[in-house]
Amino acid sequence: MDYKKQNIQNYFLYDTPVDNLFITEYMVSAPEKAVKVYLLASMHAEYGLPLDAAGLARKLRISAEEVSDAWEYWVKQGLVRKVFKDPDNREDYAIELLNIREMMFGRRTETQSQPAPGPFLVDDEQLSRLLRDVEAETGRLLEAKEPEEIASWMSEYGMDPQVILLGYRYCTQRGRSNRFRYVGQVLKDWRAKGLATAAQVEDSLAAADRHYEFYRAVMKELGFHRSATEPEKRIMDSWFDKLECSLEDVMDACRKTTGISNPNINYVNSVLVGRYNEKHQEEQPVTQENLFARVEALYESIREENKKKTQQIRSDIFTKIPQMQSILKDIRECSFALSSAMLKRAGGTELAELRKKMEGLNAMKASLLAKNGYEENALEAVYDCPKCRDTGVLDDGSRCSCFAEKAEMLLKNNGRQERPTA
């Protein structure tokens, strides 16, 4: 025997439930248009009525950009989640309205459509190695809550540590945010596609790269035992699409790096661009067609320069404050202990003591920095744009405002000024 409800046609005759928690905790301080977007979407979700962003904008008599801004607001508030069909396309997404009471008082779980796996069995040494590998992959220290979040990916979502590390590598090499919130979204997108192992993820990524074999051949010729980064891939793509190079032209240019101490893609690119300019007797201007690649290349150079600045600042601090390295080691060990305790579902007393110890270590670090004339965040990575961390992409996947500023600067100066001066 089957059971089903009659389809509702005149939905305006019915009620849409709204949690009092939404009214008292969120609505009172939310922007008016964000509230309107949330309530209208809630009604459509309640009765299964389809409505795209354009339709939502028409009904509310607001712009599509204002609808997008509203969803960005609710994502930051934690009331909705963007569900991406493709992690590489951050513009195509569905909105999932989260249950406020479940979110506040329930135990965090995956969506009903996704079967919840058991916890991934990992020992202390595996976890410790994973945390160290994440720091090495990202070139930064872990954030305060990051070890706990990584532990929860394994204990609550059953994620393989190798997949987690691959997620950080993927985001870092492609010039995207490698903060744990963004990486977590990429990992969940992979999981929704049924990619459970590192081999499955790598196969999927390889299939998506239209020049994968070409990239690998170039990197091998240059002596690199790693995958090409996203900016490097865009530069290599330009050799075929813009510079009209053959594979033999590229391999010949790669062989030109034999006599230099630091062979790299940019050197090969300069050889190929020089040949092209000599052939055409003119320099390539910045155009709408190559603008995106030029902006990404600019971000790449900024990140490289700021990485050197960060290393120099940390080196100066360690020289001036010798005990700082020991304190940072204690902080990492305490973070690991916290993560390990979470995996073992330790009691509240043990977790409270570990968190108290962590607070004490962080206070000691801040005090030493202040006494020696440094800001509290002096050990953190240097960025031109702290919002997107010099990637052009915010944690929620949207484009940072600095991207448009850099694009405008390149177009205005025809690429001559590759970075604004102070």
Image (cartoon, rainbow, N blue to C red):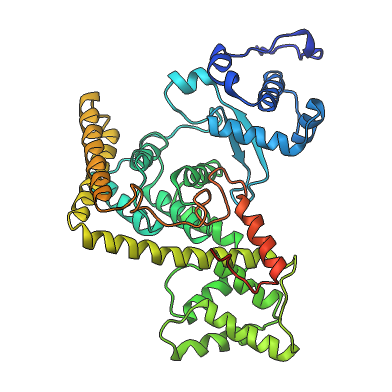
In the depicted view, which residue is nearer to us: 116 or 105? Answer: 105
Q: Quadrant of the N terminus?
A: top right
Residue at position x 64%, y 83% in the image:
273
Q: Position of residue 229 (x, y in %)?
A: 51, 65
Establish if 11 lies above or below 323.
Answer: above
Residue at position x 24%, y 28% in the image:
352
Establish if 105 lies above or below 212.
Answer: above
Residue at position x 55%, y 82% in the image:
268
Establish if 257 lies above or below 210.
Answer: below
Q: Is residue 353 left or right of residue 66?
A: left
In the depicted view, which residue is nearer to us: 290 or 337? Answer: 290
Q: Position of residue 251 (x, y in %)?
A: 56, 85
Q: Is residue 330 left or right of residue 242?
A: left
Establish if 77 lies above or below 238.
Answer: above
Q: Is residue 290 visible?
A: no
Q: Position of residue 384 (x, y in %)?
A: 50, 57
In the depicted view, which residue is nearer to us: 320 or 172? Answer: 320
